[in-house]
Image: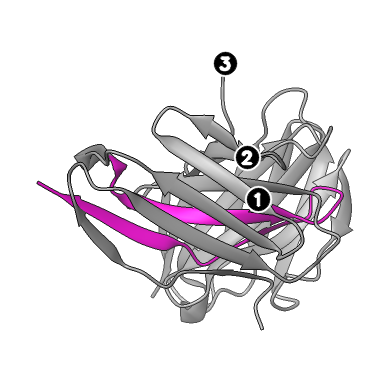
Amino acid sequence: RKEVEQDPGPFNVPEGATVAFNCTYSNSASQSFFWYRQDCRKEPKLLMSVYSSGNEDGRFTAQLNRASQYISLLIRDSKLSDSATYLCVVNRDNNDMRFGAGTRLTVKP
Amino acid sequence: DAGVIQSPRHEVTEMGQEVTLRCKPISGHDYLFWYRQTMMRGLELLIYFNNNVPIDDSGMPEDRFSAKMPNASFSTLKIQPSEPRDSAVYFCASSTGYGNQPQHFGDGTRLSIL
């Protein structure tokens, strides 16, 4: 079993749709969590950190459930520019970060 | 501010040749990471350094791969001899290491071994 597992995708949604990605992790000692975005042929870039109480950044909302070892990312009012691969990242400790395989999102006009 | 700088951006070479990838982390970052990304295996951590010291190299695929960090502003990843299955995008990333801060990635080196 992989340490970080994500929805397989791909997700193809129309502009304006709401889309949610899920991620589970196996190491209960994991300490911090992130969502990264990776555009085609580009490097991964930090989208947002995920806090225990949940957090929002504009159209993006991240949730963490430590008991279920589950992370989610919600994108509201999706834009064409949101098309990318979204990577769930779990930091075990000492900056030992584990990346999920990513979920590809395509937003269509 | 300058981000993580990698070179070269692209490398095409023949099987058996030595390949050297270079990375300059963000100034002040104590942690440096080398990753490999392929379609089949996704993003894999190869090795990471803390204060120039290798901490975990369990992701290095085999003895053909080696990495060094002679000082706080420079690291290399070498493959000798290279094989076609080494073809991938190699990313370098750095972080401050404080409070589980996120990592910042370089643009990557796209490596093709013929």
Q: Secondary structure at mark 3?
A: loop
Which quadrant of the view contains residue B23? top right
Q: Indicate the amino acid at tag 3.
A: Asp
Residue bearing mark 3: B1
Picture coordinates of residue B21 (x, y %)? 59, 51
State the quadrant of the N terminus of chain A. bottom right
Is residue A85 inside the magenta stretch?
yes
Q: Which residues are magenta?
A: A82-109
Q: CA distance from mark 1 to mark 2?
A: 6 Å
Q: Residue furthest top?
A: B1
Whether residue B5 is situated above or below residue A90 in the rendered picture: above
Residue at left 69%, top 39%?
A51
- Please tell me in which quadrant of the rendered image residue B29 appears: top right
Callout 1 amino acid:
Leu
Q: Nearer the viewer, residue A63 or B60?
A: A63
> Please, what is the three-letter code of the amino acid marked with disc 2?
Gly
Q: Nearer the viewer, residue A86 or B92?
A: A86
Residue identifier under label 1: A64
The numbered disc on residue A54 is 2
Task: Give me the chain letter of mark 1.
Answer: A
Residue closer to the observer: B6 or B102: B102
What is the C-alpha distance between the residues marked 3 and 1?
Answer: 31 Å
Q: What distance separates the C-alpha of mark 3 from that of mark 2?
A: 30 Å
- Where disc 2 sits, the SS reads loop
